[in-house]
Image: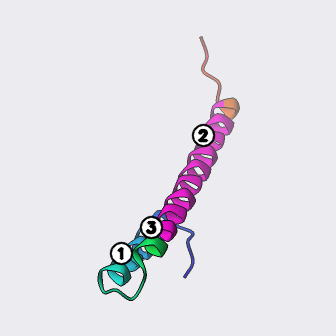
Amino acid sequence: MRLDTADSIRLEMARVYRDARARKLDSQEASRLVYMLGEIRKAYETTVIERRLKSLEEEHEGNPRKA
């Protein structure tokens, strides 16, 4: 599974949860996986914010306000 969107990460977390509830996955292993997925989500969100900020900064530099 690709983990390149917040939604795909959320879906993978839900899959891990369902597998743990169904006892297909040990709860400690599920906890570790969900923790890692949470860290991936944070990194993804940071990357998205950085890209948006850079885009806004570039747009602002190209269109400075006149006083």
Quarter holding residue 28: bottom left
Q: Nearer the viewer, residue 45 or 53?
A: 45
Identify the residue under disc 1: 17
Identify the residue under disc 2: 53
Sequence-first disc among 1 and 3: 1
Q: Nearer the viewer, residue 6 or 34?
A: 34
Amino acid type for the residue under numbered disc 1: Tyr
Q: Nearer the viewer, residue 5 or 19?
A: 19
| Residue ID at (66%, 41%) | 54
**Is the residue 41 above or below the residue 55 in the image?**
below
Quarter holding residue 31: bottom left
Residue 34 is situated, as x and y percent measured from the top left of the image, at: 46, 66
First to last magenta residue range: 32-60
Element carrying mark 3:
helix
Element carrying mark 1:
helix
Q: Badge 1: few (under 14), some or many (20 or more) residues near its Cα, within 10 Å?
A: some
Identify the residue under disc 3: 31
**Is the residue 42 above or below the residue 59 in the image?**
below
